[in-house]
Amino acid sequence: MNKKYRFVNYEPSLIRFYNQEHDKLYEDITLLAIGPETDSIMCLGIEVKENRHILERENMVIGSIFKNGVVAEFDLSVKIFKYYFRKKAKVRRFPRPKIAVCTSVEMTQVEERALSDLIHSLGAKDVLIIEEPFEKAKRDIPSTYRTIIEIIPEA
């Protein structure tokens, strides 16, 4: 298998974006489809799951950016998170917010750093990573963290 497409064996994660200022919740899964000849992202999230048979027929490469709830494909993750924030979650202005990330996966320092770097690349001023599901962690998240992301492995 081409190293470029190692993400095809990763299980998708459920990802939730919550913006307290707009009281908005957006959910999707971390699936993507890449064109076989162009290497460009053709389809994301639930649309990939719903149209998988068509995408496979078109020889699209289908996979996930997360492996067991941990960032596995950094460059693709940055592109996809920017898309989620701007297009799907409708966060047009991104005034260097503080972002909390909840995950039920225990991470190594390297995995935690990759996740932190990913969120910082979106323009975050500060990133707080809590290794608990959102429902358990919400009491520990300071009110200054107005945007909360939850990553749930194997959607």
Image (spheres, grey):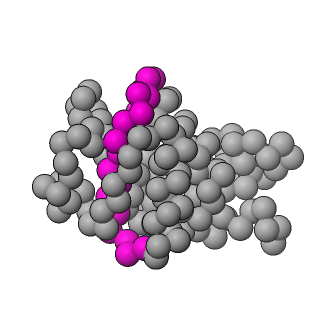
Outermost residue to the right: 37
State the count of labels.
0
Q: Quadrant of residue 94?
A: top left
Outermost residue to the left: 139
Q: Quadrant of residue 35?
A: top right
Q: Residue at x 37, y 71 (%)?
A: 105
Name the foreground residue: 24 vs 111: 111
Q: Residue at x 48, y 58 (%)?
A: 115
Q: Is residue 27 visible?
A: no
Q: Residue at x 26, y 66 (%)?
A: 132
Residue 103 within the magenta-colored segment of the rendering: yes
- Give the answer, above or below, for where 127 lies relative to 66: above
Q: Is residue 37 left or right of residue 115?
A: right
Q: Is residue 16 left or right of residue 29?
A: left
Q: From the top left corner, tell me how far across and down residue 61 is, in percent.
A: 73, 55
- Give the answer, above or below, for where 33 lies relative to 63: above
Outermost residue to the top: 93
Name the foreground residue: 64 vs 93: 93
By secondary structure, the bulk of the magenta-drawn segment is best described as: loop
Quarter the C terminus occupies: bottom left
Residue 7 within the magenta-colored segment of the rendering: no
Q: Is residue 148 visible?
A: yes
- Give the answer, above or below, for where 53 lies relative to 122: below
Q: From the top left corner, tell me how far across and down residue 118 is, in percent.
A: 53, 51
Q: From the top left corner, tell me how far across and down residue 114 is, in percent.
A: 53, 61
Q: Residue at x 50, y 69 (%)?
A: 111
Quarter the N terminus occupies: bottom right
- The magenta region covers 88-107
